[in-house]
Amino acid sequence: ENQVFKYYAEGEWKKSASGKTVSIVNPTTRKTQYNVQACTQEEVNKVMEAAKAAQRQWARTPLWKRAELLHKAAEILKENKDPIAECLVKEIAKPAKDAVTEIIYVGAVDFKVVRSGDLLSYTAEEGVRILGEGKLLLSDSFPGNERNKYCLSSKIPLGIVLAIPPFNYPVNLAVSKIGPALIAGNSLVLKPPTQGSVAALHMVHCFHLAGFPKGLISCITGKGSEIGDFMTMHPGVNCIRYCAAGHYSFTGGDTGIAISKKAGMIPLQMELGGKDACIVLEDADLDLVATNIVQGGYSYSGQRCTAVKVVLIMESVADEFVEKVNAKMAKLSVGTPEENCDITPVISESSANFIEGLVMDAKEKGATFCQEYKREGNLIWPLLLDHVRANMRIAWEEPFGPVLPVIRIRSVKEAIHHCNASNFGLQGSVFTKDINKAITIGDAIESGTIQINSAPARGPDHFPFQGLKDSGIGSQGIVNSINMMTKIKSLVINLP
Ligand code: G3H
């Protein structure tokens, strides 16, 4: 308890020359749980230098060897799931029951350590095929050319990838960047979220044990407000992969949009939250809907970018739906992550205040509360808000908490209009037995993914995952991530 952790650079665990640390507050106790190093800009510079040197060697390391090391890291990560689980319980209040198990689906409140190991192995397998293949082009397919030019193209690494995962998935959303970056021959600098840093350091230790070359992976801890811009604008960085968590930001004020404006001429991939809507039509299986809404809306207390964030339901079935959801919500346990509760404290006091602000705004404007609003410290009891209207903030903003608005609609057109009026476009879902309607609605919604008859979810991890509009840039998923962290290089053989 209250331990001080070192940061990881050049293959070693180090104390920062700043002599300062950043404290990590346990969301449940609201007391300092751990401390991490407050790294300096000078230390960032050193990490970048080491990362560049290591990357040059690594890019020349045979692909099968890179894959072998990733498989090894995957194994070690799975073996070490317990200490990582413990950190996640203490740092980000993830329920303990999901700490050591893998449940691949939207209902999973797991922090996905085992999933992360599987993700690494899958990445290694995909990587050897994707990167082990090049292309041959012949010149005479283009008008006016003879067959005297042979173009050989292959994928080469970008260089240094900066990965900035969010607090809600400090392990899985770090590994989803580390694996593809490394298999493609890049080096990786990780800036974990403050809450989640210690879990991330434990995860990085697994890569250390696997025997990756010194400097190839590093983990810099510290305040985003001090080293955030410095890292994202660092000339050594060749690619940034950033994930936000709700209304949180990395540098203490900047959004992903601001980062994208400051970053250099480098590829960016960002996952920036959403207002994922569930559209429910009259013919939907309401039991299936209720199960998905409760899992999708309240798992990990709604702190997922893919959580259901608004329900748009046809008026004629709304009463029955609300009744079914309320019955399921009554069974949710509320308490500490150590006690395996379904609903646990949200990440911070400021987050709880933000959520409360949305709830109170909706109350003043006439929303119906299906449960009593209750809060103790950072713990907010699950709440369904019925009769929400477009003039309420909660109709548009992302609470990142266990509170879910229901908007009653009279037509499909109204639902599509609401979705498309949002600045976000991460995921959405449609519940209906009519597949034709589902496809038509899915086509009309401006979102990166539309789920038919299921709540939104990122996984399985090889599926593409992307946001439209303010929800992000680029696409995740194993194959897309590997490709995104490479460039094409051509060699043209000119015959006489
Ligand atoms: O919070 C954002 C994550 O990408 C959501 O992942 O759908 O697996 O919970 P998930």
Image (spheres, helix red, strand yellow):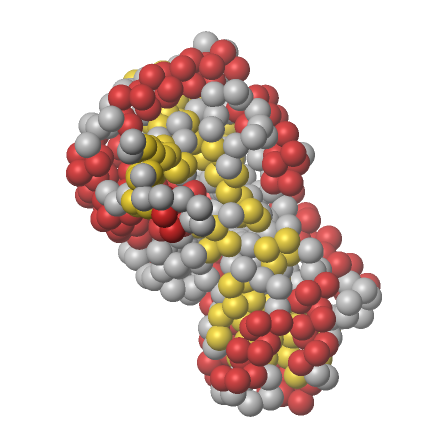
Q: Residue at x 44, y 38 (%)?
A: 196
**Residue 462 in sight here:** yes
**Residue 127 figure quarter:** top left
In-front residue for pair 395/239: 239
Q: Is residue 298 left or right of residue 372?
A: left
Q: Is residue 120 left or right of residue 356?
A: left
In-front residue for pair 359/462: 462
Q: Is residue 281 above or below residue 51?
A: below
Residue 299 position, x and y percent, is 47, 61
Q: Residue at x 66, y 63 (%)?
A: 373
Q: Residue at x 71, y 69 (%)?
A: 418
Quadrant where the N terminus is found in the figure: top left
**Residue 27 in sight here:** no
Q: Is residue 132 above or below residue 365?
A: above
Quadrant where the C terminus is found in the figure: top left
Q: Count the marks: how many?
A: 0
**Residue 5 figure quarter:** top left
Q: Residue at x 33, y 24 (%)?
A: 55
Residue 100 position, x and y percent, is 29, 52
In-front residue for pair 119/35: 119
Residue 17 position, x and y percent, is 45, 9
Residue 358 position, x and y percent, is 72, 56
Q: Is residue 371 above or below residue 343?
A: below
Q: Is residue 107 left or right of residue 243?
A: left
